[in-house]
Image (cartoon, rainbow, N blue to C red):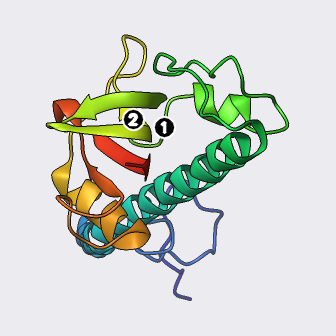
């Protein structure tokens, strides 16, 4: 009678299969890793593009919302609020008119919103405008391509004309009234 070949750790009579206890081979792991890497590298640009679109939409929406709040205030009171520093709500504005948390927090592109009354930007004086200004606690990277995308969303697609422009320090400027 022929006895089945067995491994020393197996029970007597149990057949040994060389692959029965093996895990993934090195080749299989490398193939899986290569496929996952390719998927990752395809997904990263899409994710970055979506992040950029989200920033563009958020900034455009904030400029529109804040401009409406300031215009409403001026219409109801007969004058624009007084100048204030970046990230500081103008004293005349109320929480009902302006969402203070949105105004005082760092924007999606860095920096903080800044109310500008009767200020000069790049040689032109504006009665009312909103800028985004870098502060000590909210630095901002100047990204002209992103500013152009914001301009295409909110204005005329030209950073030298229209209501959305490049202001002092090459930061974004949204003009409410010339």
Q: Quadrant of the N terminus?
A: bottom right
Nearer to me, 150 or 127: 127
Residue at 18%, 30% (x, y): give it.
169
Q: Which residue is mark 1?
A: 107
Q: Are marks 2 and 1 in contact (CB under 8 Å)?
A: yes
Residue situated furthest front in the rendering = 78
Relative image position of residue 13 (x, y in whole percent): 63, 74
Query: Which image quadrant is residue 154 in?
Result: bottom left
Residue situated furthest right in the rendering = 96
Earlier along the polypeptide chain: callout 2 or callout 1? 1
Relative image position of residue 134 (x, y in whole percent): 33, 24
Within-10-Å neighbours for mark 2: few <14, some 14–19, many 20+? many
In the depicted structure, whether residue 70 falls above or below residue 2:
above
Query: Which image quadrant is residue 39 in?
Result: bottom left
Q: Secondary structure at mark 2?
A: strand
Residue at 71%, 29% (x, y): give it.
100
Residue at 37%, 60% (x, y): give it.
52
Q: Secondary structure at mark 1?
A: loop
Nearer to me, 144 or 118: 118
Residue depth check, mark 2 versus mark 1: number of the one nearer the observer: 2
Residue at 53%, 80% (x, y): give it.
4
Residue 149 relative to residue 109: left or right: left
Q: Is residue 55 visible?
A: yes
Relative image position of residue 175 (x, y in whole percent): 40, 49
Relative image position of residue 123 (x, y in whole percent): 14, 36
Residue 46 relative to residue 3: left or right: left
In the depicted structure, whether residue 106 falls above or below residue 172:
above
Query: Residue 132 got which mark?
Result: 2
Query: Residue 174 got which mark?
Result: none
């Amino acid at each position: 009678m022929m006895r089945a070949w067995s491994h020393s750790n197996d029970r007597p009579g149990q057949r040994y299969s060389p692959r029965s206890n093996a895990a993934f081979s090195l080749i299989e792991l490398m193939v899986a890793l290569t496929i996952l890497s390719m998927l990752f590298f395809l997904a990263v640009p899409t994710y970055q593009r979506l992040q950029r679109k989200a920033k563009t939409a958020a900034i455009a929406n904030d400029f529109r919302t804040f401009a409406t709040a300031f215009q409403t205030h001026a219409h109801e009171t007969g004058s624009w609020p007084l100048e204030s520093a970046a990230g500081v709500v103008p004293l005349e504005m109320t929480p009902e008119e302006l969402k203070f948390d949105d105004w005082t927090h760092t924007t999606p592109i860095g920096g903080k919103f800044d109310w500008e009354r009767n200020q000069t930007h790049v040689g032109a004086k504006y009665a009312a405008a909103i800028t985004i200004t870098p502060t000590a606690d909210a630095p901002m990277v100047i990204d002209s391509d992103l500013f152009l995308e914001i301009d295409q969303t909110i204005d005329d697609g030209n950073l030298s004309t229209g209501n959305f422009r490049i202001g002092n320090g090459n930061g974004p400027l949204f003009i409410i009234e010339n």
